[in-house]
Amino acid sequence: MKKQRKQESQRYAECMTILVRGDGIAAYCCAHLLAQAGVRVALDRPSRPRVPAIMLSEAAVSLLADVFGHKDLFRDLPRVRSRSVLWGEQAAPVKLPHSAVVVSEQMLLASLRPQISFEESLEPAWTVYASRPLPAGAVEHKFGSRVARASQVDVRNSEGPGCWTESTENGWLFLIGDQDGKGWLLTVGGETSAVLVRSRLIAAHIERLRGSGGEFPSYPRILAPLSADQWLACGTAAIGFDPICGDGTAHAVREAILAAAAIRAISSGANAAAVLAHYESRLTAGFQRHLESCGGFYRAGGSGPWWQSELEAAEQGLAWCAQRMASFPAFRFRLNGYDLEVVA
């Protein structure tokens, strides 16, 4: 009887269609994992600007390579082997070992999407929101006000890929450069030209500003609820991370892994309410850890009004998370590979 129910659930999963709304890493990862499991997938790809440069840690590259089966993913790209940090009002620059690659979002997605084939459907059994527009009835909770501005730059005397991070009076700067002397500067907390005038580290590495790459919110934010009847959110639709902590791509992949596993578990007969409660609690716990990391950076970054205001916002977010986590039941599931199983 148990074997028969499993076979019936598998046939149901193979017949239903999942609509994935998004055109980024979370969408591609979720769709890929569902398709690999034999689920029919439809992809709605809203048009949006691409991020000009993403730095992927070795751990993030390994995670992507494992999910998509690309053992040699970005193996031939030059590595960022060190990072220089000047963080705090009285701090001195520190050079630390590092290992990462720098790619454009366009290049990253082009390296992954050809491996995925999708089907069209107008009546999905589930919808995964991996980008805007957000699902009806869900509210995005924002903790902070900071905006990041991206600028294309020429990097002075480049000896290979590198990255630099610096706290400033009212924010921070992040610079990544390639082996050809080109790079991208991220400015948080002020106009780029005005902030660079008072830079103690990064300004010395910039030959000139070449142009603006736009601006985007860089404060932490989370959707609530993160799921409901026949839909769930992941990726940037679910959580927005402060780039100061790095590896937003890896976070998006992990969310997508859990989202795909949750949908498959429900389609196989698991209690939907219990699975979705687990999904929400895991993502909320991850967001809580992110806010704790942000708090550490912002306590050490500076003592002025800007830093205090953003730190207070992070602390408000932690209080919100604590209240939210108290409403969830204890974890009843765990990931085993790419499958969600009941904790014994």
Image (cartoon, rainbow, N blue to C red):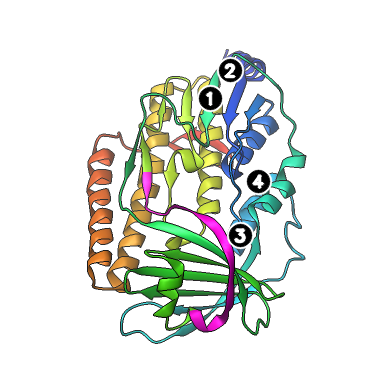
**Pointer 3 and pointer 1: residues touching (CB < 8 Å)?**
no
**Pointer 2 and pointer 1: residues touching (CB < 8 Å)?**
yes
Give me the disc on residue 53.
Answer: 3
Helix, strand, or loop for circle 4? helix
**Position above or below: 230 against 296:** above
Give me the disc on residue 67.
Answer: 4
Q: In the image, what residue type sits under mark 1? A: Thr
Query: Which stretch is magenta?
Result: 203-221
Instruction: Residue 39: give x, y in percent of width and height.
Output: 66, 25
**Pointer 3 and pointer 4: residues touching (CB < 8 Å)?**
no
Work out whether residue 62 or residue 221 is closer to the camera in this orientation and state it.
221
Helix, strand, or loop for circle 2? loop
Q: Residue at x 53, y 36 (%)?
A: 130
**Pointer 2 and pointer 3: residues touching (CB < 8 Å)?**
no
Q: Residues within 10 Å of mark 1 (few under 14, many from 20)?
A: many
Task: Give the mark, 2 or 3, whose residue is nearer the N terminus.
Answer: 3
Work out whether residue 190 or residue 14 is closer to the camera in this orientation and state it.
190
Q: Residues within 10 Å of mark 3 (few under 14, many from 20)?
A: many
Cα distance in 3D space between marks 2 and 1: 7 Å
Task: Give the mark, 3 or 4, whose residue is nearer the N terminus.
Answer: 3
Question: Which quadrant of the figure contains the N terminus?
Answer: top right
Q: In the image, what residue type sits under mark 3? A: Ala
Q: Residue at x 64, y 36 (%)?
A: 33
Instruction: Residue 26: give x, y in percent of width and height.
Output: 57, 42
Task: Give the mark, 4 or 2, whose residue is nearer the N terminus.
Answer: 4
On the image, numbered disc 2 is attached to which residue? Answer: 124
